[in-house]
Amino acid sequence: MSPLWLLVAIIVFALVGAVLGRNRAVSCVNGNIATLHSRPGYYGSYVLIWTALPAIFYMVAILVAQPFYNSSVIDTELRTGYTQSCDLSLARIEGDADAETPAICEDKEQYETLDTRRALMRSVVESVAIGVSLLDEDTAAKLHNGLVAVRPTLKSVGVALAEDVPGAVVDAANRLNEVNATGNMVLIAGVVLLVILGFVLSYLRVKPRLRARNLVESNIKVALVLASSIAILTTVGIVLSMLFEAIHFFSQVHPFNFFFGTEWDPRFTSAGREGGGEGSFGLIPLLWGTLYISFVALLVAVPIGMFAAIYMAEYANNSVRAIAKPLLEILAGIPTIVYGFFALVTVGPFLHDAGAAIGLNISATSVLTAGFVMGIMLIPFISSLSDDIITAVPQSLRDGSLGLGATKSETIKKVILPAALPGIVGSVLLAASRAIGETMIVVMAAGIAANLTANPFEAVTTVTVKIVSQLTGDLEFNSPQTLVAFALGITLFVITLGLNIFALHIVRKYREQYD
Amino acid sequence: MQDTNPNLKQDSDIRSNPIKMSGEKVTVHYGAKQALFDVDLKIEENQVTSLIGPSGCGKSTFLRCLNRMNDTIDICRVGGKIMLDSTDIYNADVDVVELRARVGMVFQKANPFPKSIFENVAYGPRIHGLCRTKAEMDEVVVTSLQKAGLFEEIKDRLDEPGTGLSGGQQQRLCIARAIAVSPEVILMDEPCSALDPIATAKVEELIDELRENYTIVIVTHSMQQAARVSQRTAFFHMGNLVEEGPTDHIFTNPKDKRTQDYITGRFG
């Protein structure tokens, strides 16, 4: 029985239990519902929760734990298998001084020293195990005794292997199947036990004075806590996975060379070859490109966004606002890839031609193109956040200023904007962290050459562009050329996280001023 | 000062002071709803006129007409005439900005700008370009704070934010801010409603002192306050001006049944 069907069974049983619990509550008081502590539905929910939840938690726990247990079983099994085979081979050639080291012993050596090799073998064992479980008993036995070749046999049931595998793997696969079968038994038995136990105990507790409503209520809190912790744990998981790969990278490239290097040249072509050199992984040119483009983007977005926000908040009457604000926010709904080809197809060539007309050499992919288009993308962020913040400035301040004979623009300039400034700064910082993490626009519009240049008409590249190009390369996963993407990723993450925290801090400080 | 003959029929016609502002057949609509009905009210120079009446009676609306603060509300339409000296302030060629410099306003809730105390007071003179030098500005700020009776309490912390003062101090700061542009009329919209009794007493004392130099119109919910600070009182009810006259007449000898009911606490 697969876990999915098991889950369905639990739920169906729990629903039946809920109906029974409700009926018991009603019959306890001979249908006189008013004398129950809670409404009958709560007794139903109470039974439902106690029937389903423990079993579901148990199931989740087993399903989470099983892969860990499985891989440790595979490891032990393979290790002993390899050692045995190697010892056998060595015994066979004992005394023969000219004999080469048997292949199986080299395999064993590799298996014991390389993490990647272990991971690979583990997945091979898993697919062999699936293949074996599909074979009929006869062939499986033959396979077990080494009477038929592994690869063609498994191919006949649709499991493809890259190379033939030693007998140790087949043994491990068989063991894995056994462990899985036992695990399944433990799972089903436990679930059945918990469902029955949960149902019986909660059903028997259903009495008129049972505070079912309060008990159900406390479970709702648990559900809410679970939901929010999933979000938090996911973040932690993402950070950790990036962190481990980045640490892996820093074990191959010195952090000093990464953070302070001014040259970016990962040498894709020579990677993995003898004497090809490591390549240099200087962060500075990429960071410079990122910050430069973001700066240009903010230069475009902040004035336009601010003026739009001031118009929306202070001047536009309700009917204009009702139409213009959603229209402005449509900009926020355009996928960034669309901005990307807008930059590539329209803005880039336009700027190039316009530059040529006045004697400037603007390359089609340049800081200016990417920054300008990214600026347009950021307008709705700034305008919408600033609009909210300006609207939140109390009317009494406007009245105070107007009552002293200030004009509308004087009031905005001297009272409203200074009062809203912390919030506006917060919104600009949020937009900045958006700009720094933006990928698609710069991939298409900024170029891929890592230039350390101050000329806005030249192509530069950004951290995000390099992450994309390093990860889409056809390279071993554990080469520094690939791993650098994680170091870049975590650097970017730290920068945007810092900006966000700073921005939220400022926004919060601003809120306290009026509440 | 006032003729207190109880047999007088038209109190509002007996005046010892020149008229500073007057409303003639003032009507106000908020959208389709009419908030004021043909209000005729004269405001005497260097006197405190209080506007009283139950909530929603139109007294604040009338007050806000006097310096056209109602212009900031989109759906508000004002009809009739409001004269300041001899000009109709709703005339097309009147500059609202200049009008509001002449007719200042203090609001129900103290609303100091989130700036320093000094900058709060200097705000008006600065936007109107009243002071050429720093020294002149200093003098205007200090004088205004002195007139508002606040200077002694805060003279050492003019650089601190105005929002950090106590409620009563904030309200007096707002009065100082209004005085700083040397208005002729000061409108006060329930200036003490958010203050404790001691702060209220200070502000009331101040209002009485300010009468010497300014014409004051004050909206209040407290009849005791109207009796304490004002020389003339106008009673509003459901958008109509019911009765207007010397304060002591209104409180001791109201002519209208509704006024009597209100001041004796039968409704409102």
Image (tube, grey):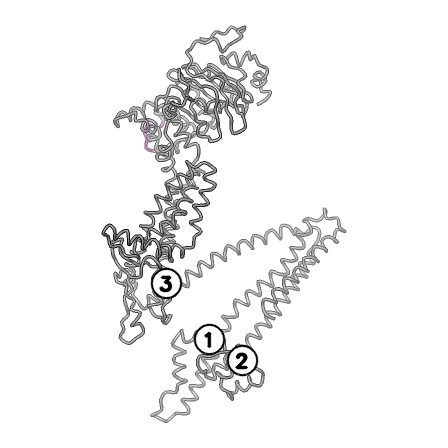
Q: Which residue is mark 1?
A: A122
In space, the residues marked 1 and 3 are separated at their CA atoms by 29 Å
**Quarter of the figure with the C terminus of chain A:** top left
> x, y (%) of residue A485?
36, 64
Q: Chain of mark 1?
A: A
Whether label 2 touches label 1, CB < 8 Å: no
User: In this view of the protein, can residue B249 be seen by the observer?
Assistant: yes
Q: In the drawing, does residue B51 fall left or right of residue A26?
A: left
Say which amino acid is labelled 2.
Answer: Val
> x, y (%) of residue B265?
58, 20
Q: Are marks 2 and 1 on the same chain?
A: yes
> x, y (%) of residue A68?
49, 70
Q: Which residue is mark 3?
A: A468
In front here: A50 or B40? Answer: B40
**The residue stretch that appears in magenta:** B154-159
In space, the residues marked 2 and 3 are separated at their CA atoms by 38 Å
User: Residue at the spot x=52%, y=68% of the render?
Assistant: A65
